[in-house]
Amino acid sequence: MSCLMWFGFMTLTKSEQWFCEVILMNIPKLSPDFTTEDIRKLRDYNSQRHVSMSLEEIQEDLRPSVGEFNRLMAERKRPAAVHSSS
């Protein structure tokens, strides 16, 4: 079902079109093991999301996720607390 079928004659802004397309797309189902097939599904999904976006829009879309990824990676690099045994 396309956005046109949902909104008919309404003119949507670019961000509204993007939002509508994302809502109507099938979000990929990932396996618990996170396989190479899951990576392919995610790449395809993101490619479809970004196809009608400008470079600036793509960067704005990805910025929150990149920040979260960097935070998680920083947590993984921190040394674990050392427990002294008495």
Image (tube, grey):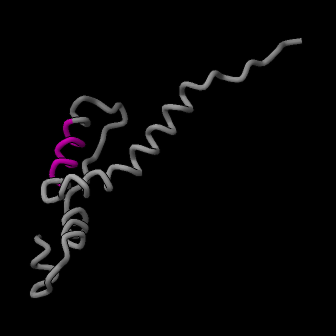
Question: Is residue 71 inside the magenta stretch?
Answer: no
* Residue at figure coordinates x 82%, y 15% from the top left: 84
Relative to 36, 82 lies left or right? right
Residue, far bottom = 9
At horizontal 24% and vertical 29% (from top left) the residue drawn is 36
The secondary structure that most of the magenta stretch takes on is: helix
Q: Is residue 46 magenta?
A: yes
If the image is split into quadrants, where does the C terminus sit?
A: top right
Reply above or below: 34 against 53.
above
Q: Position of residue 25 (x, y in %)?
A: 19, 60
Image spot of residue 50 (x, y percent): 19, 53
- In the image, taking residue 82 as reference, residue 85 lies left or right, namely right
Rendered position, 81 above or below 37:
above
Above or below, 82 relative to 60:
above
- Residue at (9% x, 87% y) in the render: 9
User: x, y (%) of residue 32?
Assistant: 37, 36
Q: Which quadrant of the view contains residue 22?
A: bottom left
Please identify the quadrant where the N terminus is shown.
bottom left
Residue at left offset 14%, top offset 74%:
3
Q: Answer with left or right where residue 39 lies relative to residue 11.
A: right
> Which residue is most to the front?
56
The residue lying toward the viewer, choosing from 45 and 62, is 62
In the image as oriented, which residue stretches furthest toward the top?
86
Q: Nearer the viewer, residue 58 or 79?
A: 58
What segment is highlighted magenta in the picture?
A: 40-48
